Image: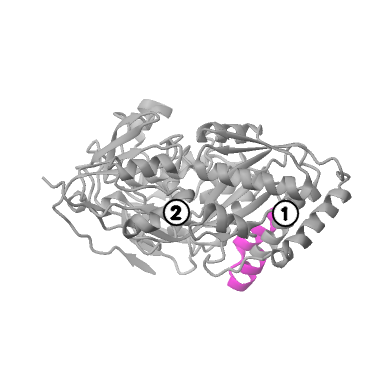
Amino acid sequence: MRLGAGAVGHGDTRATLRRGNGPEPESLDLHRARSEAALTILRDLYEGLAAIGADGAPVLAAADRCDISDDGKMYRFHLRFAHWSNGEAVVAEDFAAAWRRLVDPHTGAQYAGILEQVRGAAAITAGTAAPSTLGVHSDGSETLVVELTRPTPYFLSVLAHPATFPINRGSLAAHGGGFAKPGVMVSNGAFELTRWDFDSHLVAVRNAQYWNDKATQLDGVEYYSFADAATELRAFRTGQVDVTSTIPAAQVPWIKEHLGQMLHVAPQLAVYYLGLNMSKPPFDKSRELRQALSLVIDRERLVQSVTAAGEAPAYTFVPPQINDYSPPLPEYSAWPMPRRIARARQLLRDAGLDGKPPTLELRYNSGELHSRIAIAVARMWKDALGVDTTLRAEEFKVLLQDIERGDAAVFRASWLGDYNDAYGFLQVLQRRSGVNLPRYANPTYDELLVRASNDGDPARRRELLRSAEALMLADQPLIPLFFYVSKHLVDARIHGWQDNAMNIAYSKNLTKAGEGK
């Protein structure tokens, strides 16, 4: 089977795009970045073998052709004639070296597991094999050969994720972990990083070395960091930014009335959840408590009265619109709230907590929406179960650090699908996953996912995934609250914006009227 690249266009209008980008990115190291703020920037600075098309489906990018073996286990990517921002040629070994660094346990990459289908990756991330054994190698400078352990229909979508992008080996060797800084970073995308003012904004300028530079419609991009959506909205209204990363829930009615023509709302493959720290009391040994806390949260009320932008209540971790999958809804999702509350109280009695529920602390990153959700959830827990909850808002980077150290008992988190497949959500909670924030560990769950990943029959694979999700939801290491919709304000001067389920819009595809040269 052979995939070919589509035609490219070009434009003459050049300007600077100012993007509202949410919280400050934690890192621009391809293997240490994990927030959407960081990934948005990296998609502009670098280019992988594949990218996400306007409709959310993968398309070839740094590769212009891909040959796939009949058994679906061998991929040969033929690279475009492209250059790094310093003028050096982009070669196949730049990808191979980056992938070895990604799966190397010494790197500590949160997304190391994203290449688990590549031969040898699982053993390498487990520390039982050397990175050099990974099933990827260059066949000359222009061809990258990838060997998989099993057919993976969504593999091209995986390769659109920044964790799989190439790294300039010379820059990495010269600067080590500092290779991702402004003035040092060497990238292969449509833009290159020139400035990072912490807690303010980052600046990228057009990369004249990019293989398709003639199609780039902008001179540069400025990414503005905002701790909360209300501040970002004010920046949009005063013209500081042309596009917002989201909108404040409390002002959705006003925005629809006054800025409706610039509002973009679309379903997104993403879930908002509360993580429960499974490594420490009170959640390590009390499934009844975890289930009770989930039962009494009125998701319908949350999406109608708190988020209020079209989000759907979530009783599963995998969104219902995911490709070729139907999530296993818990039975209680259809119960009226009085029955759910009665069952939750019985669970506390079964756990020996009747009359003495624990005091909890809920941590979340600063922001108007997260605060309103936390207040609403805490009130539901108090009213139904008598649980007192201390609320603690933190900067996003501080929250991530607290979760990684295991200091947060209950914490706000989310998962945005890296590709359109249920496995991409469920693998998050495998014991060895670097993004398993609740520290969930169930050998049966892991085994079901292994069986699903190795089963070539779509129907059997689907049922194995459903069984795994049902088991995880019964264990309740996390509490899904709602499924996202993407929510952006896009200035009328910006053209080329297209909504998709992956919520990805590359700056290189946008134009800005009124600021041409």
Secondary structure beneath dot 2 equals helix
> Is 49 in front, or is 263?
263
> Is 233 in front, or is 416?
233
Can you give x and y, in whole percent of width and height, for residue 236 in the image?
A: 33, 44
> Is 398 in front, or is 2?
398
Q: Is residue 385 left or right of residue 165?
A: right
- The relative height of residue 11 versus residue 331 in the rendered view (above or below) is above
Question: For the point 67% across and 59% down, which residue is it?
Answer: 469
Cα gap from disc 1 to disc 2, whole angstroms: 26 Å
Can you give x and y, in whole percent of width and height, for residue 96 in the image?
A: 41, 45
Quadrant of the image containing the C terminus: top left
Q: Is residue 446 magenta?
A: yes
Quadrant of the image containing the N terminus: bottom left
Q: Is residue 445 magenta?
A: yes
Q: Which residues are magenta?
A: 443-464
Q: Nearer the viewer, mark 1 or mark 2?
A: 2
Q: Is residue 307 visible?
A: yes
The residue at which mark 1 appears reads as 296
- The relative height of residue 399 versus residue 325 in the rendered view (above or below) is above
The kind of residue on which mark 2 rests is Val
Furthest residue toward left: 517
Question: For the point 34% across and 61% down, which residue is it?
Answer: 54
- The relative height of residue 271 versus residue 394 in the rendered view (above or below) is below
The residue at which mark 2 appears reads as 252
